[in-house]
Image: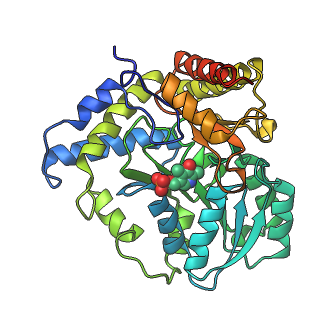
Amino acid sequence: MIKRMPGINLRIPGPTPLPPDVISALTTPMISHRGPEYIALHTETIAMAKQFFQTNNDLFMFTSSGTGTMEAAIVNMLSPGDTILGVSIGLFGDRAIEVAKAYEMNVIELRYPMGQSSDPIEIGKIIREHPEIKAILITHNETSTGVTNDLRSIVAEVNKNAPDKDQPIFLVDAVSSMGNMDIPVDELGLDVVYTSTQKAWMSPPGLALVSVSERAWFSYNFSSCRKYYFDFAKMKKYNDKGQTPETPAVSAIFALNAALKSMTKRGVKETFTYYKDLAAYTRSQLTNNGFVLFGDQSHASNTVSACMIPEGLEDKAFRGHIKKRYNVILSGGGGEMAGKIVRVAHMGWVTRDDIDEVVLAMANTRRDLGK
Ligand SMILES: *Cc1c(COP(=O)(O)O)cnc(C)c1O
């Protein structure tokens, strides 16, 4: 079997590499998006994805990047002037807050320094002090730092601090974790959870998946935001018939379907365990080779790891050399972490061999550059 595109080891946190069966699914001849073949493909794909979301909620497939469903979560659940809590531990948490502000929500911003995870107790306290909070916007896996939020503890604190009938809804960015990490949507009561296929799903960019709970539908009825393409009710009408309202990215769905088949073959729990173990392996290999991990390691991500650029080296020279000399492509940091960290993705189609190659390339580069 071909391991990957000849020579290139793409380890950025999306788009991620595609296995051969997914690439070949992409070349499937086109079908009518209103015919029985499409309905079968759509229905089967959603059913498999629901297993990884661990949900019986509605699950929609939008032709969009992840940010589209971030916006969809906000415009379908809320109204201008609503008070919400925006929890940010990095750049994607910041983005969700920006989207909510663009729709004129009143956002209580709870920001943590990059590399930290949020404090469930502090979130609970804010919920108690602000019973007017209608929703909590939170990132599960902050791709910009390699740190996750502990959703289970946060849900528990929120439930403890909000009267039953007035519990805020949870709008969760799981763009870079759903599919590879264990996020039991129904068990935790997460209302709107979204992800996109170029991250943890071994699939190309183009699709975003979003789950919508019973409680979320209740909120939908009170939302006065304008919407059309991303209207959940319009989507539900078609989704219940195994279709989408507008033309879907059919080729991307063929690809996702193939990827989900191999993920399902491995098993849902087994998949989560695979990435958990691979993440631990990656971090230990980095540490063993003298790299210094970045961020709160008690909340380290199972899909992306960040470490410091070795002392005395410039990010551009370091990553530039890794790419030119070793054909390994890594991401740097963004925002205030620009030039300070390098990020290694271990999501989607990836094995220990790929990680070994990455770490060896990093260690060799440091040596090549005299550090
Ligand atoms: C990549 C990413 C996004 C944005 O997804 P796009 O598909 O690029 O729009 C949002 N949140 C997180 C956590 C991400 O990793």
Query: Most extreme residue toward the front, as rendered?
Result: 370
Q: Position of residue 360 (x, y in %)?
A: 62, 17
Q: Position of residue 171 (x, y in %)?
A: 60, 61
Q: In this rendering, is residue 100 above or below 317?
A: below
- Relative to 126, 324 lies left or right: left
Q: How is the image coloured?
A: rainbow
Picture quarter with the C terminus: top right
Q: Between 95 and 82, which is closer to the camera in this rendering?
A: 95
Which quadrant of the figure has residue 215? bottom right
- Residue 57, visible in the rendered structure: no
Picture quarter with the N terminus: top left
Q: Residue at x 80, y 76 (%)?
A: 130
Q: Position of residue 212 (x, y in %)?
A: 49, 59
- Relative to 329, 1 lies left or right: left
Q: In this rendering, is residue 328 above or below 228?
A: above
Q: Between 11 and 226, which is closer to the camera in this rendering?
A: 11
Q: Residue at x 28, y 47 (%)?
A: 42
- Residue 301, visible in the rendered structure: yes
- Relative to 94, 20 lies left or right: left
Q: Residue at x 32, y 57 (%)?
A: 239
Q: In this rendering, is residue 221 above or below 145?
A: below
